Amino acid sequence: MPQIADQLSALVKALQYLASQGIVMKYEEIHKVLGRAIWY
């Protein structure tokens, strides 16, 4: 899967594809928080 289309649903599909291939993403450390959302 060389490219990922726009929108969150496309990212979800891409991550599911990678997981099916045995490739997973794992956060080791957060270096910098660039933004934060506050939900009411």
Image (tube, rainbow, N blue to C red):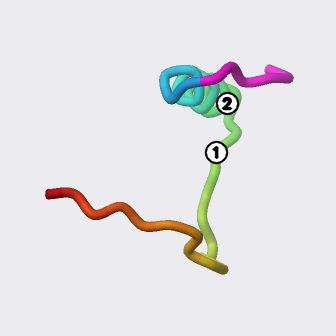
Answer few, some or many: residues within 10 Å of disc 1's Cα (few below 14, many 20 plus, some between 14 and 19): few
Query: Which residue is denoted by mark 1 in the rendering?
Result: 24
Quarter of the picture containing the C terminus is bottom left
Image position, residue 21 (x, y; %):
70, 27
Cβ atoms at labels 2 and 1 below 8 Å apart = yes
The vertical placement of 28 against 22, above or below, is below
Q: Residue placed farthest to the left in the image?
A: 40
Spatial CA distance of label 2 from label 1 is 7 Å
Tell me the SS state at disc 1. loop
Query: Which residue is denoted by mark 2 in the rendering?
Result: 18
Can you tell which mark lies on residue 3?
none
Give the residue type at disc 2: Leu
Give the residue type at disc 1: Val
**Which comes sooner in the sequence, label 2 or label 1?**
2
Left or right of 7? Residue 40 is left
Image position, residue 22 (x, y; %):
67, 35
From which residue to which does the magenta span run?
1-6
